[in-house]
Image: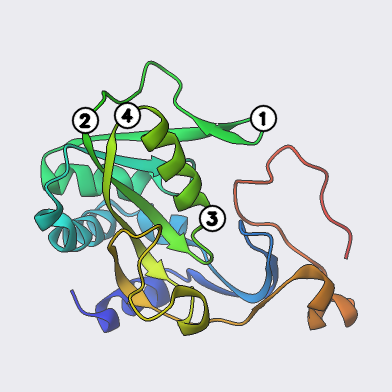
Amino acid sequence: MTPEDVKRHFEETGALLTGHFKLSSGLHSDAYLQCAKVLQWPGRAGALGAALAGKLRDAGADVVVSPAMGGIVIGQEVGRALDRRAIFAERVEGAFTFRRGLGLQAGERVVVVEDVVTTAKSTREVLDLVRSLGAVPVACAAIVDRRGAGKKGPDGKVDGLPFRSLLEIEVAAWPAEECPLCRSGVTLVTPGSRFLGTPPPSA
């Protein structure tokens, strides 16, 4: 699957949104990639999962781990394509943990899979959880890598691990205090899951 194919999935499902968004990283942006609009279609989700799995096959993973909620569907599809167990971590009082009887065994080899990565903050937090349980992270991946050259460095690694993606796209993002859209009074929308249960931000 080429980057153009990935873009087509987003365009055909109306998944590339424009406006004023608070990203899961806390940064503000004028664009948002709503992967749920793509992944709601099983055929598209399966195709993206198989393509991402192809980039991870050489990692020799035993388990696919994804952060909830955005990573759950693509993590499941990558696990299906690799024929490996796929589980997810959830935030409890701000920190990732495993619930619902899910977990890892010491020594298991893990790939961490997300839908979109902007700063890789969630990926790093899940990696910390994986390591705390004695499992061994071997690679990270996402459908879309929007870190940009200035954030990911020359090798693109996260915590020293290989990072694989299907599409690299650089979209403007700013800390809240530097956001030109805030200064212009454009209404702020929080479309992701990290801030569920928190009061809506004021524009």
| Residue 3, image x, y percentages | 28, 80
- Distance, label 1 to label 3, CA atoms, is 16 Å
- Distance, label 1 to label 4, CA atoms, is 22 Å
Secondary structure at badge 2 equals loop
| Residue 78, image x, y percentages | 22, 49
Q: Where is mark 2, residue-wise?
A: 107
Q: Where is mark 4, residue-wise?
A: 134
Q: Which of marks 1 and 3 is nearer the N terminus?
A: 1
Q: In this view, does 175 lie above or below 192?
A: below
Quadrant of the drawing holding the N terminus = bottom left
Q: Nearer the observer, disc 3 or disc 2?
A: 2
Mark 3: few, some, or many residues within 10 Å (few <14, many ≥20)?
A: few
- The residue sitting at 23% across, 55% down in the picture is 49
The reply to whether callout 4 and callout 2 are in contact (CB within 8 Å) is: yes
- Distance, label 3 to label 2, CA atoms, is 24 Å
- Identity, as a three-letter code, of the amino acid under mark 2: Gly
Secondary structure at badge 1 equals loop
Q: Which of marks 1 and 4 is nearer the N terminus?
A: 1
Looking at the image, residue 46 sits to the left or right of residue 32; the answer is left
- The residue sitting at 62% across, 46% down in the picture is 194
Q: In which quarter of the image is residue 141?
A: bottom left
* Depth check, front residue: 190 or 94: 94
* Depth check, front residue: 145 or 3: 145
